[in-house]
Image (tube, rainbow, N blue to C red):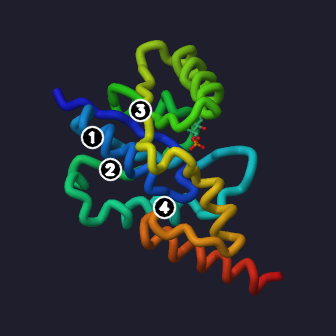
Amino acid sequence: MLKTAVYPGSFDPITNGHLDLLDRGLKIFDRIVIAVAANRGKKPPLFTLEERVELIRAALEGHPFADRVEVDSFQGLLVDYVKRLKAHAILRGLRAVSDFEYEFQMALMNRKLSSEIETLFLMTGMEWIYISSSIIKEVALSGGCVTGLVPPLTEKRLFQRLRENRQRT
Ligand code: PNS
């Protein structure tokens, strides 16, 4: 039986840290579905859902295991989406201790909602340990260099957004 994991997130935008985690996940699972969350509550995302999906798909072009990866989006509860897919686990990345509380809370809430779905955490590679979509956005939108930290199309789109923001003000 093929083992499938759902790798959920906001991916606003995808970073090389996400790609590193995907590669680690592919060593364990046969298939990974990257699931972009449509509703994230708090802050409006920098990129629309369609843009975030497009940036992930572009980042996967030429990836050696692209045939084992799917990119999708979902609305509502993650556990319902995982059940609909008949996936075996939720895959999440852990960078530093600071991620732990939030991840712990989410994993336990997901377990409370659906006891049969397990969450598997993998450690991000050391070179990506300080990277998050939020810090990438902060740096790029202030004109800082994020080359090598995000896929090329993501970098281009971040700077387009910076230019659009500057034109607006
Ligand atoms: O990349 P993020 O923002 O840390 O990802 C968080 C995400 C999208 C995985 C989480 O907010 C989520 O699963 N949202 C869907 C709604 C849901 O199921 N919430 C209950 C889990 S606490």
Mark closest to the chain's N terminus, 4 or 3: 3
Residue 77 picture location, percent across and down: 56, 33
According to the picture, the residue beneath numbered tag 4 turns out to be 149
Q: Few, some or many C-alpha atoms within 10 Å of disc 2 (few <14, some 14-19, many ≥20)?
A: some
- Please tell me whether mark 1 or mark 3 is closer to you in this view: 3
Identify the residue at horizontal 52%, vertical 17% (top origin).
Answer: 111
SS under mark 1: helix
x, y percent for residue 162: 67, 76
Q: Which mark is residue 122?
A: 3
| Mark nearer the N terminus (4 vs 1) | 1
x, y percent for residue 125: 41, 43
Q: Residue at x 16, y 26 (%)?
A: 1
| Residue drawn where x is 63% and y is 69% of the image | 140
Disc 4 CB within 8 Å of nearest ligand 1 atom: no
Q: How far is the residue under mark 2 from the one under mark 1?
A: 12 Å
Tell me the CA gap for discs 3 and 2.
19 Å
Residue furthest to the left in view is 1
SS class, disc 2: strand
Q: Which residue is mark 2?
A: 70
Cα–Cα gap, marks 1 and 3: 11 Å
x 59%, y 63%: residue:
48
Q: Position of residue 42 (x, y in %)?
A: 75, 46
The one nearer the camera, 121 or 45, is 121
Which circle marks residue 26 in the picture?
A: 1
